[in-house]
Amino acid sequence: MSSIKEKAYAKLNISLDVSSRRPDGYHDMVMVMQTISLHDAIELSFNNGGKVRAKTNLPFIPGDERNLAVKAALKFLEATGHEGQGISIQIEKSVPVGAGMGGGSSDAAAVLRAMNRLYGSPLSREQLEELACSVSSDVAFCVAGGTALATGRGEKLQPLPSLPDCLFVVCKPEFSISTPELFKKLDQVALRRHPDTAGLVSAIEQGDLSQMCRRMYNVFEDVDDRRLRTVSEIKSLLLDHGALGAVMTGTGSAVFGVFPKDSETGEVCSLLRREYGFCESALAVGRVLD
């Protein structure tokens, strides 16, 4: 096998809580995370140059180790004793960049899955997740995906049952929000509330979509940032058009609404696309690696 293809699925934060700042400068997180059908397309192949490089359909994305997909490939080669092997990574981006949807992390996770297949599956899922932690926090979740409770920096994962049948409408306005910037602002405010994570997990376990949607919350929406007014506008439009709940994912700027699975969402998608740029509907995706 000289080349291999893999889908890199986006993620959404059904809820996101920040409990404390750690001595190492990172923050302790409590998140319910979900893989969705929106994805980038990855293709890996060997090359004779001895280098690991990535190319994408977006010219501003770097092709060296600043790209998490390249970093993941190098980590895999080192861990499996194949240092010096040339790997070409072609990435067709469909997941918005700077959206809080884990696009770079999902690309890196897809590279780890693909390389493991390419080399005959030398690493278990647990080993891949451990390796993923050395790339970036969100990569560990994206390796297997599905529905999970993530704690620590996001690398401690507890699989949850699949979500009740539903449809996501995801909208990203034209701006992005810097993750370090938003964390800095979060440290300067007193949070008004925290998600009811236990209640959210219970609703998922019971398959109760309406109760799940009532408990969706992201503490970053408490930050004083004028761009979050746009987030609130998008949430309101989603709710006005039948969403059972709406919330920002990650540190933004993408916002999603949860609709009953048989909902007609073409009108709201068209409206959001005209007003804000990117908008797509997507389904929940189960675990992609066991």
Image (cartoon, rainbow, N blue to C red):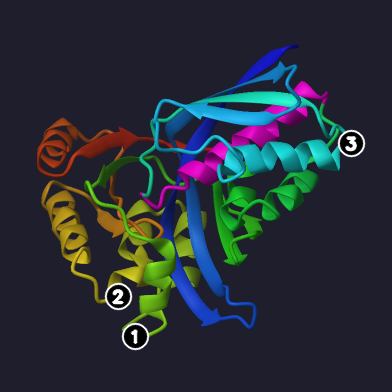
Residue 249, relative to residue 48: is it above or below?
Answer: below
Q: Are marks 1 and 2 in contact (CB under 8 Å)?
A: yes
- Residue at the disc numbered 1: 189
- Residue at the disc numbered 2: 223
N-term mark: 1 or 2: 1
Side of 242 where 101 appears, left or right: right
Q: Is residue 145 visible?
A: no
Rendered residue at 30%/53% (across/down) = 176
The front one of 181 and 232 is 181
Q: Main secondary structure of the magenta part?
A: helix
Relative image position of residue 19 (x, y in whole percent): 51, 79
Residue 23, quarter of picture: bottom right
Rendered residue at 49%/59% (across/down) = 32
Residue 288, quarter of picture: top right
Q: Quadrant of the N terminus?
A: top right
- Residue at the disc numbered 3: 81
Residue furthest top in the image: 1
Relative image position of residue 69 (x, y in whole percent): 60, 38
Rendered residue at 64%/77% (across/down) = 24
Q: Are marks 2 and 3 in contact (CB under 8 Å)?
A: no
Q: Secondary structure at mark 1?
A: loop
What's the magenta region?
A: 99-120
Residue 151, relative to residue 267: is it above or below?
Answer: below
N-term mark: 3 or 1: 3
Amino acid type at image mark 1: Val
Amino acid type at image mark 3: Gly
Residue furthest right in the image: 81
Relative image position of residue 155 (x, y in whole percent): 64, 59
